[in-house]
Image: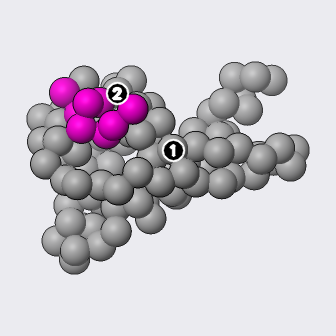
Amino acid sequence: MDIKDIAPRLPTEYLRYFFAEKDIAPRIFDKVGKDGTPHMISNAVVVEHMVNLEDPEILRNLENTLRRIDFKNGDVNHFLEHLAGAVVAEYERQAA
């Protein structure tokens, strides 16, 4: 799965354009859950989880963070790795 293929389904115009235009190298993030279970999550899976975001404040904060990273020519994958931790936490919450 490629991030550019996910981009058209993202909930805001900014996110759709951002992820469609950026050449973000595929990455796999190794995360460890609270119970010690290892998880391997791709950056595309992290972006896929953004498709279902509805909270305007969360979306605004996400966009603002991406704007700051982009302005400073930062590595978006560092931020996506951070968000991968939230994906793991949500998975564990739902599995409980």
Tell me the amino acid under the disc marked 2: Val
Task: Calculate the distance from the C-alpha at mark 2 to the C-alpha at mark 1.
Answer: 15 Å
The image quadrant where one finds the N terminus is: top left
Q: Taken as a whole, is the magenta stretch helix, strand or loop?
A: helix
Give the answer, above or below, for where 95 lies relative to 62.
above
- Badge 1, how many Cα within 10 Å: few under 14, some, many 20+? many
Which residue position is annotated with label 2?
51
Q: Earlier in the sequence, mark 2 or mark 1?
A: 1
27 falls in the magenta region: no
Q: Secondary structure at mark 1?
A: strand
Q: Which residues are magenta?
A: 1-8
Visible residue check, residue 61: no
Give the residue displayed 22% in from the left and 74% down from the top. Answer: 73
Where residue 95 sits in the image (x, y, percent)?
75, 22
* Marker disc for residue 17: none
- Residue lying at 22% horizontally and 54% vertically, measured from the top left: 23
Residue 42 circle label = 1
Judged from this view, the residue extending furthest toward the right is 35
